[in-house]
Amino acid sequence: MTVASMEPEKVVEKKFVIRNKLGLHARPAALFVRAANRFQSEITIQKGKQKVNGKSIMGVMMLAAGPGSHIIIRILGPDAQRAMTEIEKLIDGNFGEQE
Amino acid sequence: METFHGIPVSPGVAIGKALVLHSEDVFDVAKIEIRTEDIPKEIVRFEESLTKTRSELFGIQRKIAQDLGHEHSDIFSAHLLILEDRTLIEDVFSKIKDERVSADYAFALVIQRYFHAFSQINDEYLRERIADIKDVSRRILQNLRGEKKDSLVHLKEEVIVIAHDLSPSETATMDREHVIAFATDIGGPTSHTAIMARSMEIPAIVGLDRISKEISNGDMIIIDGNRGITIVNPDPVTIDRYTREEKRFVELVTELDKLKSLTAETLDGYRIHLTANIEFPDEIPSVLAHGAEGIGLYRSEYFYMNRSDLPSEEEQFEAYRHVAEQLAPKPVVIRTLDLGGDKFLSSLEVPHEMNPFMGWRAIRFCLTRTDVFKTQLRAILRASVFGSLKLMYPMVSNCTELKQANHILEEVKKELREGHISFDEKLEVGAMIEIPSAALTSDILAREVDFFSIGTNDLIQYSLAVDRVNEKIAYLYEPTHPAILKLIQMTINNAKKAKIWVSVCGEMGGDPAMALLLLGFGIDQLSMSSFALPKVKKTIRSVTFKQAQEIALRALEFTTGEEIKQFSQAKLRAVAPELFED
């Protein structure tokens, strides 16, 4: 068995408030989706009752998460923790926007 | 023969064959059922169309980056991500599999669901993105059908392009040699199609409603860009009439072209300056070609439109510097941010207003959002060492605003000095006179600035209480209303007394008959669309200053705007009959 090479399935969940000036739906959507697609895990974003696939540009735009939005990001899969760390960096760094 | 009326956005007459681009119906795809064994084939077909679309978009992105710079090509990054969207792709796959329908139908169905969802979202930025998604989707569908697209890339003969609307990806790759006119269903004077037509100097009409559906490929068409009329399959008499008109228009343009290097000087040697109004740096070639003595109004709003973030100081600096360098040593007057009202600003959360023309806009906005204002002022000041820049504040309604704006400008200058960043210490600052209160107190305002620029479009709207986009009251929008002429005269007189120069930068300055009156009132500079310049120059060169003064004073004796209009037209015809086509 090659269990050693396999990371266990994991669920990581975290709440965020979108604080960058543009909101998640504009240019940051492309940054988010590009980052999300680098990981194997499933990534969903939830705002209110609406849930979208974090790897889909159309989905992320459609969530219309403007500044001040509260969102929940749920990641399921072998690289969930690493994916969350990466996404946290993006959101907390306001997607590289200069203030 | 059939006639359609639209909005003329670029002058001239063109007669030729129609080339009809995709209409909106491209998304109305007939339902085609397929056999189970054909499912894999449809899936492959869909994947191939995505691959093909991707390589096309890369090509366009490269071309736009070359022609217009990277910030413009950036919008295609989102286009490209749509092609990789697994959710969308899987949706299409499952439609093909579960409902056993063609890839075209499946894709059209899925994408229309997205259009619908996007149009429901109350976010202006996202609603604008529908146009981008449509652009990509249209390409995907055309690739699925094996349809020829980019039909504008290689043209064998001259054509008049008819479309629902033209997208940047179409105009960027267009064969400019062979396109002689545009006509579109939607759009306004500032739409992409209009701007493109003016920079190419070909006639164009927008807002024709259903033209893309009424006209077939190869139909003979006349585009009358002077009047906004499109005639389909005209009779021989009409063709003859327009052929002559087209010829006269070309002759007039050639004749006026000779004036290019001459000054705008009256017969008795009184000299004024004629400058151009621009919105985009790529209009500069046209400005220079028409012999403008500078730019009297450089609108800076485009930086803020159709985007979700704010333009950086660097981005603005580069554009201002480019314009300053291209025009040097000729002067360029930059109007600071004039947003609100009819212009949309996606990056700033400007609340919806009941009465935006009287709302939080222009200098009012800038004095509150000093961060936005200062960024622009820094960019202008830094660029000022690369040519002859001036700046002016829009929508000034009282002296306090002017003092506050100047105070902020001084702060920015101080910051620059402390940072050892050079700028033109003598940079002239002006106020736009476009609100009646500003015109009436122009004697007071004159103490705070180096020049005035009268914005007639807004001055007319505010003085006569006429919303200029409301068709029902369009008849009240009278540039020759005695009240308007009196306000202009007063402003010019007050400028003279204070020994500052004064210009007119609204539509009025580009109308030869009005130019005659403004000259008579003693205006120092007229700024207009560059294509209007030669006719105005011809007018100025056809009269003596004394004659113009008499005409202007006479005009003030009439009681109605209509009388003044008739009078000034008649006077123009008397002094410059060459300008009249019949």
Image (tube, coloured by chain):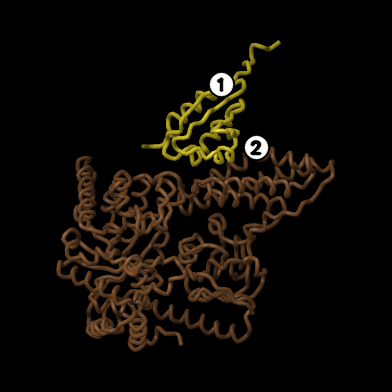
Chain colours: A yellow, B brown
Image position, residue B486 (x, y; %): 25, 74
Residue bearing the label numbered 2: B87
Image position, residue B477 (x, y; %): 39, 72
Residue type of the residue flagged with mark 1? Val
Is residue B58 something one can see in this rendering?
no
Is B129 in front, or is A82? B129
Is residue B254 something one can see in this rendering?
yes
Taking the spot 48% from the left edge, 26% from the top edge, the residue there is A88
Q: Quadrant of the N terminus of chain B?
A: bottom right
Residue type of the residue flagged with mark 2? Thr
Taking the spot 29% from the left edge, 84% from the top edge, the residue there is B558
Residue A65: mark in rendering = none
B336 lies above or below B418: below
Residue bearing the label numbered 1: A12
- Image mark 2: chain: B
Is B346 in front, or is B154? B346
**Secondary structure beneath label 2:** helix
Question: What crowding class fits label 1: few (fewer than 14 Cα within 10 Å), some (14-19), or many (20 or more)?
Answer: some
Question: What crowding class fits label 2: few (fewer than 14 Cα within 10 Å), some (14-19), or many (20 or more)?
Answer: some
- Image mark 1: chain: A
